[in-house]
Image: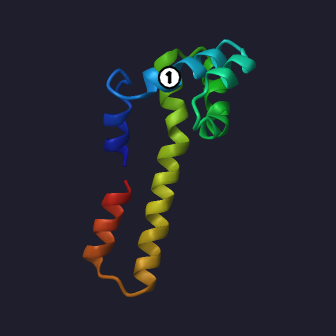
Amino acid sequence: MAAMAWAGLYGFAWNDYDAEASAAFGALSRGDLLGFFALAPSYGGSFVLRAPFAGVTAALGGGELAVYRAVSVPCLLAGAMLGVVLVRRIADHGGSRGVRALVARSAW
């Protein structure tokens, strides 16, 4: 999980964050709450949940890359928790170690 997070959080020039999310989180970082809501894309509900991470990071002096990484943390944690839940359920239903490893790898 840590290796995938590092690889995915190296930068955002190659993904959709720059085109879809950076403007909204940039407005929030400047304290422009209305701008944040106006610039958030249609899936902005997830932005509202991640906004506190962006706000705290910006308040502590983090730049655009730091905000990108901070708003990714809740999503990474949710993926990891989903993997744990799925692997436990498979184990409870008698799934083999190989199947559990495959599911864990897929979830993360």
State the residue at coordinates (37%, 44%): 2
Percent from the top left, x then y, of residue 94?
A: 37, 87
Percent from the top left, x then y, of residue 85?
A: 49, 68
Picture quadrant where residue 32 is located: top right
Residue furthest to the bottom: 94
Residue furthest to the front: 42
Please state which of residues 61 and 18 is positioned toward the viewer in this rendering.
18
How many numbered dots are placed on residues in this image? 1
Relative horizontal placement of residue 1, taking residue 82 as reference (left or right): left
Q: Residues within 10 Å of mark 1 (few under 14, many from 20)?
A: some
Residue furthest to the right: 34
Picture quadrant where residue 30 is located: top right
Determine whether 92 is above or below 27 in the image.
below
Relative horizontal placement of residue 55, taking residue 83 as reference (left or right): right
State the residue at coordinates (46%, 74%): 88
Relative horizontal placement of residue 86, taking residue 28 as reference (left or right): left
State the residue at coordinates (60%, 21%): 24
| Callout 1: SS | helix
Please state which of residues 26 and 81 is positioned toward the viewer in this rendering.
26
Determine whether 2 is above or below 92 in the image.
above
* Amino acid type assigned to the residue bearing label 1 in the image: Ala
Picture quadrant where residue 54 is located: top right
Percent from the top left, x then y, of residue 56?
A: 66, 26
Residue behind mark 1: 66
State the residue at coordinates (62%, 18%): 58
